[in-house]
Amino acid sequence: MLGHGFVYALRNAKSVVYGPHGKKIGTLGNIFMDVSTGDADYVTVHLGPFGARENFVSLEGATMENGHLRVAFEKVLILGAPNVAPFGELRDQNKNLLDRYYSVVNRAA
C-alpha cells in the first residue's frame, strides 16, 4: 500500500495509466483506499475502445512517473481481474478477491 502522499499524487495525476514496460494501458478511474490505514491500494482503469470497460488494478509496485501512474501489471492481467463493480465502496469480500488474484499473478510474473 502507498501512503497519503501517493494518494495526493494520484488525485493530481494525468489520466494515462502505463504498464510495467511503459506501454499505455488505459485511463485512470477511481482511487480506492484501505479503510483501516487510509492508504491507496487499488485504482480502476478504463480499458478498451472509448474506455468502455473499467477494471481494478492493484497499486502494489506502482510508481508515479512524470505525473502518470505506472502499474506493475500488464493490460492482459488487468483484463483478467475479477469482475468487481467499479463504483461505491470496495467491500472486504471483493477486496479479498482482488488481493488473492493480484498476489497470484504477481508471484507468477
Image (spheres, helix red, strand yellow):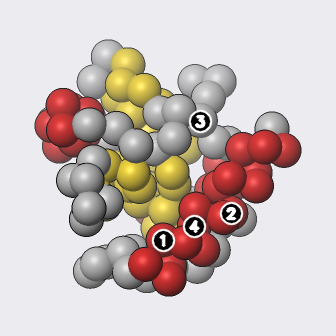
Which residue lies under the disc numbered 3?
A: 72
Q: Earlier in the sequence, mark 3 or mark 1?
A: 3
> Residue 101 shows which numbered tag?
2
Q: Residue shown at 80%/38% (left/top)? A: 109
Distance in Å between CA atoms under marks 2 and 4: 5 Å
Rendering coords of residue 67 (x, y %): 28, 24
Rendering coords of residue 96 (x, y %): 55, 72
**Of 50 and 58, which appears nearest the observer?**
58
Specify the farthest residue to the right.
108
From the viewer's perspective, is 97 left or right of 106? left
Q: Residue shown at 31%/49% (left/top)? A: 40
Location of residue 66 with respect to 68 vertically, above or below: above
Q: Specify the quadrant that holds the N terminus.
A: top left
Instruction: Name the amino acid type tagged 3.
Output: Ala
> Residue 67 shows which numbered tag?
none
| Marks 3 & 2, CB-CB < 8 Å contact | no
Specify the farthest residue to the front.
36
Q: Nearer the viewer, mark 3 or mark 1?
A: 1
Q: Residues within 10 Å of mark 4 (few under 14, many from 20)?
A: many
Q: Earlier in the sequence, mark 3 or mark 4?
A: 3
| Marks 2 & 4, CB-CB < 8 Å contact | yes
Which residue lies under the disc numbered 4?
A: 98
| Marks 1 & 4, CB-CB < 8 Å contact | yes
Q: Residues within 10 Å of mark 1 (few under 14, many from 20)?
A: some
Distance in Å between CA atoms under marks 3 and 4: 15 Å
Instruction: Name the amino acid type tagged 4.
Output: Leu
